[in-house]
Image (cartoon, rainbow, N blue to C red):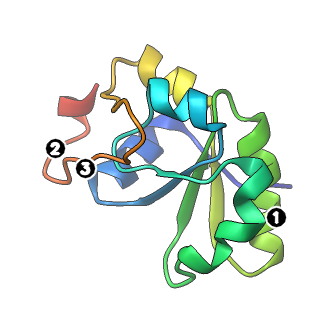
Amino acid sequence: MVPEIDQQRFAEAHAAGALVVDVRDRGEYRTGHVPGARPAPLSLLPLKLAELPKDRPVYVICQSGGRSAQATALLRDVGYDAHSVSGGTAAWTDAGRPVTTGDEPGTPDVTATTEETR
């Protein structure tokens, strides 16, 4: 079974500077992603592994949770402490949390509290 993290715990980890990998395609990523999330489309994830550190947890997000579960399984198979974000970016935005648009990850506000990001 692939480990999942719920939105509340993910928001807390994000506020603390968590490593987030967004496995949606480029167009989806561009229209809105969790601030600081690194783009790594699922089809290209094996090529991006060298860019991901293995010394900290990796939080994997997609639109609703299906692709992130697949990516999490792949990452765990090769030694990453990976966790799929339950509900994905859709649940993140539905909760009123901030998103960044464009091709760049943007900078997460690591000083924000969970209450401020709701």
Q: Locate the C terminus and report the quarter of the image it occupies.
A: top left
Q: Residue at x 25, y 31 (%)?
A: 117
At numbered mark 1, what does the secondary structure look like: helix, strand or loop?
A: helix
Q: Locate the N terminus and report the quarter of the image it occupies.
A: bottom right
Which one is in front in this view, the residue at disc 1 or the one at disc 3? 3
In the picture of the structure, the residue carrying the numbered disc 1 is 74
In the picture of the structure, the residue carrying the numbered disc 2 is 112
Q: Residue at x 78, y 35 (%)?
A: 66
Q: Is 54 rendered above or below residue 77?
A: below
Amino acid at dot 2: Ala
Question: Which callout, 1 or 3, points at the residue further toward the start of the chain?
Answer: 1
Which one is in front in this view, the residue at disc 2 or the one at disc 1? 1
Q: Nearer the viewer, residue 89 or 13?
A: 89
Which one is in front in this view, the residue at disc 2 or the one at disc 3? 3
Q: Nearer the viewer, residue 9 or 37?
A: 37
Q: Is 96 rendered above or below residue 32?
A: above
State the mark number for residue 38.
none
The reply to whether dot 1 and dot 3 touch (C-beta < 8 Å) is no
Q: Position of residue 4 (x, y in %)?
A: 67, 48
Q: Position of residue 9 (x, y in %)?
A: 45, 45
Question: Which callout, 2 or 3, points at the residue further toward the start of the chain?
Answer: 3
Amino acid at dot 1: Leu
Left or right relative to 115: residue 47: right
Left or right relative to 115: residue 3: right
Q: CA distance from mark 2 to mark 3?
A: 12 Å
In the picture of the structure, the residue carrying the numbered disc 3 is 107
Question: Which callout, 2 or 1, points at the residue further toward the start of the chain?
Answer: 1
At numbered mark 3, what does the secondary structure look like: helix, strand or loop?
A: loop
At numbered mark 2, what does the secondary structure look like: helix, strand or loop?
A: loop
Q: Position of residue 87 (x, y in %)?
A: 62, 29
Q: Residue at x 65, y 46 (%)?
A: 23
The reply to whether dot 2 and dot 3 touch (C-beta < 8 Å) is no
